[in-house]
Image (tube, rainbow, N blue to C red):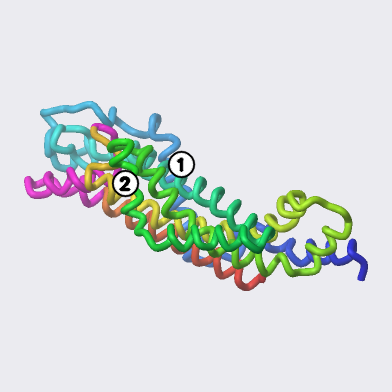
């Protein structure tokens, strides 16, 4: 087999892995995907769908129960709970998505660089990942908040650092295996550069694994950011956020209005469960196709 034939054979072998993941998700996976699609659509259309301004207080509606005008009642300041849940999805989901995007980009770059270069470069990157992996993510977030102050930027920075080794270690192991396969040698014999081989051949073949790892990590990022906001160190009032709404809703629940805490907590649980189901299904597909 010539070098060109080996490279073409590898591309043919990997082609099914780039097919849409929804084809083999199964019934539960389809339900999870539909739930996430509905949440995403509601988030994007919140300015249109939300019946009230999420930050406008209305003391006449303070701690009010469900009614035709306010389907989920009002919070302690009379703000419409349903509107705040719709708008709160933006901060609750955008932060974790940014964390996963940054950590995946950085982790994948480090992993492929280490796997391709080998030797001292691989050793240094591996030791760095071990050090980062040993520190709990909440510690990075707290240190970043201490330096930058409470708010989303510090938490995103801290959790990005914390999540990077999780992605990098998995991708590095896969990249080391791919590095030894004939299609890489075939591309090298054809005179292609290291960067070109990594970007055009190695990275596409690692893409299903990277996607599966990123989707799985997204659920944990949602929980971590919501927990930090619950502690008052993440998203700051009066911004609508599910983590903050669980915190404020606990006080409202003791005063007869449990819908705020229940609604926000249930949405967090459903989104995390849906993300985990999708991550599991995509991971299984990736394993079967390898």
Q: Which residue shows up at 54% across the image and 49% down it?
A: 106
Q: Is residue 212 visible?
A: no
Q: Quadrant of the C terminus?
A: bottom right
In the displayed structure, would residue 18 be above or below residue 229?
Answer: below
Instruction: Name the residue furthest front.
Output: 120
Could you say which is closer to the camera, residue 130 or residue 195?
130
User: Where is mark 2, residue-wise?
Assistant: 143
Q: Position of residue 96 (x, y in %)?
A: 42, 47
- The crowding category of the residue bearing disc 2, from other C-alpha atoms within 10 Å (few below 14, some 14 to 19, many at least 20), is some
Q: Which residue shows up at 29% across the image and 47% down it?
A: 142
**Secondary structure, magenta segment, majority class:** helix
Instruction: Name the residue furthest left.
Output: 255
User: Where is mark 1, residue-wise?
Assistant: 41
Which one is closest to the eye, mark 1 or mark 2?
2
In the displayed structure, would residue 211 be above or below residue 283?
Answer: above
Q: Is residue 32 visible?
A: yes
Q: Which range of residues does the magenta coloring cover?
A: 238-263
Q: Quadrant of residue 198?
A: bottom right
Q: Which residue shows up at 74% across the image and 49% down it?
A: 195
Q: Position of residue 234 (x, y in %)?
A: 29, 42
Q: CA distance from mark 1 to mark 2?
A: 34 Å
Q: Quadrant of the N terminus?
A: bottom right
Q: Is residue 37 left or right of residue 18?
A: left
Instruction: Name the residue furthest right.
Output: 2
Q: Position of residue 199 (x, y in %)?
A: 71, 50
Q: Position of residue 63 (x, y in %)?
A: 12, 39
Q: How many marks?
A: 2
Which mark is first along the chain, 2 or 1? 1
Q: Is residue 137 left or right of residue 63?
A: right
Q: Which type of secondary structure does the marked residue at label 1 adopt?
A: helix
Q: Which type of secondary structure does the marked residue at label 2 adopt?
A: helix
- The crowding category of the residue bearing disc 1, from other C-alpha atoms within 10 Å (few below 14, some 14 to 19, many at least 20), is few
């Amino acid at each position: 087999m010539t070098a060109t034939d080996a490279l073409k054979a590898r591309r043919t072998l990997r082609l099914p892995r780039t097919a849409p993941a929804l084809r083999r998700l199964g019934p539960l996976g389809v339900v999870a995907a539909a739930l996430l699609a509905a949440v995403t659509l509601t988030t994007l259309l919140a300015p249109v769908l939300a019946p009230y301004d999420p930050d406008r207080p209305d003391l006449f509606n303070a701690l009010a129960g469900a009614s035709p005008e306010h389907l989920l009642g009002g919070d302690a300041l009379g703000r419409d709970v349903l509107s705040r849940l719709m708008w709160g999805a933006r901060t609750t989901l955008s932060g974790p998505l940014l964390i996963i995007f940054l950590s995946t980009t950085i982790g994948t770059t480090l992993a492929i660089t280490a796997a391709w270069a080998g030797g001292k470069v691989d050793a240094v990157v591996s030791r760095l990942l071990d050090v980062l992996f040993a520190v709990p993510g909440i510690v990075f977030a707290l240190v970043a908040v201490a330096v930058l102050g409470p708010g989303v930027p510090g938490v995103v920075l801290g959790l990005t650092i914390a999540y990077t080794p999780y992605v990098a270690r998995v991708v590095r192991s896969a990249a080391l295996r791919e590095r030894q396969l004939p299609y890489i040698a075939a591309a090298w014999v054809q005179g292609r550069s290291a960067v070109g081989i990594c970007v055009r051949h190695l990275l596409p073949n690692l893409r299903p694994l990277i996607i599966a790892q990123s989707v799985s990590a997204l659920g944990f990022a949602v929980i971590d950011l919501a927990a930090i906001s619950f502690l008052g160190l993440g998203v700051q009032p009066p911004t609508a956020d599910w983590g903050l709404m669980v915190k404020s809703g606990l006080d409202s629940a003791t005063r007869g209005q449990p819908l705020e805490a229940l609604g926000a907590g249930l949405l967090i649980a459903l989104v995390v469960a849906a993300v985990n189901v999708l991550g599991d299904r995509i991971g299984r597909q990736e394993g079967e196709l390898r």
